[in-house]
Image (spheres, rainbow, N blue to C red):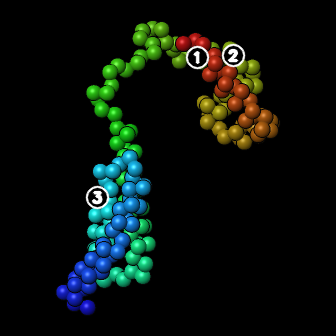
Amino acid sequence: MSNRNLKKAADNELKNAYSRYYSTLYKFCLSKLKNDVTYVDDCVQETYLVLYNRLLEGEKFEYTLAFLYKTASNLIKKRYVQLKKQENIVSIDDIREVVNHSVDIDDRLTFEEYSRMISDALNDTDREIFTLRYSEELKIDEIAERLNLTVTNVSTRLSRMREKLRTLIESSD
């Protein structure tokens, strides 16, 4: 089909789809974009634009309304992603004060002090598990094999140890 005939066929198909499905598509977009009414017209317009471009490429649609729904649905999803990104952006004007939990640097514990606190809080086996896990970065099954313990035992000890240390460190602040 020549470009002129293709364009003429696309124009006719677009007019037909517009007259048959506009109000249905508009209601669909409106129902999905309740909180973003200003975008409804843009969504409907862009949906028809996608249809028109595909028609110009020579594509034929057996179920035009289904294509319009799917296209509009995809555009709505993109819009929600955009809105979500905008929500995550914080303006510098919105930041009034950065909270500093420890104003004086001397109030904080040094690494050595934390290490000593951890060492004092743990028994020999837990201290060894802690060292293997966090200093040597071994996996739990490797620690269990090296210490002749079960994987469950090591996992449980690590979980309880983390909770104990979290409480200990929070109380020192």
Q: Residues within 10 Å of mark 3 (few under 14, many from 20)?
A: few
Q: Position of residue 95 (x, y in %)?
A: 33, 25
Q: Which residue is mark 3?
A: 42
Answer with the quarter of the image where residue 41 lies: bottom left
Q: Amino acid at mark 3?
A: Asp
Q: Is residue 30 above or below residue 67?
A: above
Q: Is residue 172 left or right of residue 12?
A: right
Q: Are marks 1 and 2 in contact (CB under 8 Å)?
A: no
User: What kind of element bears circle 2?
Assistant: helix
Q: Residue at x 68, y 14 (%)?
A: 120
Residue drawn at the location 69% of the way across and 25% of the way down: 161
User: Are the residues tagged 1 and 3 within 8 Å (C-beta)?
Assistant: no
Tell me the quadrant of the picture where the N terminus can be found. bottom left
Q: Are marks 3 and 2 in contact (CB under 8 Å)?
A: no
Depth order, front residue of 155/22: 22
Q: Secondary structure at mark 1?
A: helix
Whichever of labels 1 and 2 marks the residue nearer the N terminus, that label is: 2
Q: Amino acid at mark 2?
A: Ala
- Residue at figure coordinates x 19%, y 86% from the top left: 4
Q: Amino acid at mark 1?
A: Glu
Q: Residues within 10 Å of mark 2 (few under 14, many from 20)?
A: some
Q: How far apart are labels 1 and 3 at the CA level?
A: 52 Å
Label 3 sits on a secondary structure element that is: helix
Question: Counting residues from the N terminus, which is met first, the one under dot 3 or under dot 2?
Answer: 3
Instruction: Name the residue that disc number 2 marks.
Output: 121
In the image, what residue occupies the spot 71% across and 27% down?
A: 160
Q: Is residue 101 left or right of residue 98?
A: right
Mark 1 or mark 3, whichever is nearer to me: 3
Residue 48 shows in this picture: yes
